[in-house]
Image: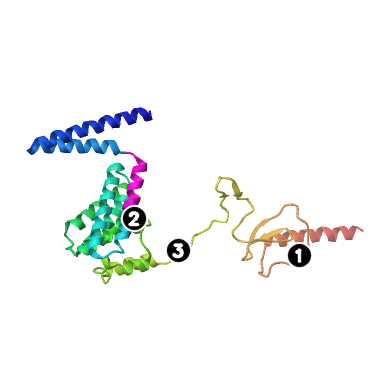
Amino acid sequence: MALFSALKKKSTLNAAIKQTVKARKDEGAKADQLFISSYQGYADVVKDDLVLADALYNWGFALLHQAKIKQAEESIKLYQDSIDKFRFCMLVEPNHLGSAIDGGVAYMDLARIKNVDVDHDDYNQAKISFENAERIQKGSAAYNLACIYSLRGQTEPCLEALELSMEFGSLPDTEDILNDADLAQVKDAQWFVEFMERVTAEPEPEVVDENAVVLDELGNVVKEKTKNERKNPEIEVDGVVYDVEGNVVRKTSGSEESTKTKPDVEVEDKSVSAESSSNKKVIEKAHTKD
């Protein structure tokens, strides 16, 4: 199977090369059509090569971070090189999330270095890259899109993107959000203040059901729910069960008189009193006969 795939790719590559040769000899629309067709052939050859995709991504990632520590002129060249690697990676593996996100980051960094307007094509390309990341995994680049919307003064889309980022757990740390220069235009807005209050709010305590069955990671029962488990403790005195408020819950069958101390709460149980009186009369009759 691997040999067949290799032969097929070789054939596709040869066809693309021939189309390029023909395109160079032609002009106008026909030449463009041949060039475009050859590009598709080259793309088919490298597509789904995961090793190549990972190599291209990590190469672009290294260039991106090297660009961050260089002076403007050299930095611009490195950013552009990193973008080229990310774009090539996306050609090989269209669903490569890392290249989609970091490609957008590289475009935004490049735009800042060049000090271009927020409507410049570098920002447009960054937005396209982040939207592609959202297509691959929802919420993954929502915060990045919020930054672009903020820079462009688009408050509603900015809030929606921030909400989406919070929903999918991709928000940066609170301090990073508050110090992000891309969000400077919206930081004083009431909706942003309210959003950050929700972000920093303490989560509600989790309600634990003490009688629930507890399972381990393999699905084995760690703790079983038993019939005797009750949320409120009970006290048994002389065969009568009381709750914490002193109310009679039930009587235990076959129980004998005991010397246990009764609960502090006074409990009046007519049925118990009646039974005790009856027993007293029987005892008195027995003594009379003797």
Q: Earlier in the sequence, mark 2 or mark 1?
A: 2
- The residue depicted at 36 percent of the width and 69 percent of the height is 175
Q: Position of residue 51 (x, y in %)?
A: 37, 42
Magenta span: helix, strand or loop, mainly? helix
- Mark 1–mark 3 Cα distance, whole angstroms, equals 43 Å
The residue mark sitting in front, 2 or 1, is 2
Which quarter of the image is occupied by the C terminus? bottom right
Q: Residue at x 37, y 30 (%)?
A: 2
The image quadrant where one finds the N terminus is top left
Q: Report the mark closest to the observer, 2 or 3.
A: 2
Please, which residue is most extreme toward the right here? 290
Residue 263 percent coordinates (x, y): 69, 67
Quarter assignment of residue 27: top left
Q: Which residue is mark 1?
A: 260
* First to last magenta residue range: 48-61
- Nearest the eye: 149 or 103: 103
Local secondary structure at mark 1: loop
Evaluate if marks 1 and 3 touch, with contact meaning CB atoms under 8 Å apart: no
Q: Is residue 160 left or right of residue 246?
A: left
Q: Amino acid at mark 2?
A: Ala
Q: Return the residue nearer the eye: 84 or 219.
A: 84
Q: Is residue 155 visible?
A: no
Q: Secondary structure at mark 3?
A: loop
The residue to which callout 3 is attached is 204
Which numbered disc covers residue 62? 2
Q: Position of residue 228 (x, y in %)?
A: 64, 53
Q: CA distance from mark 2 to mark 3?
A: 42 Å
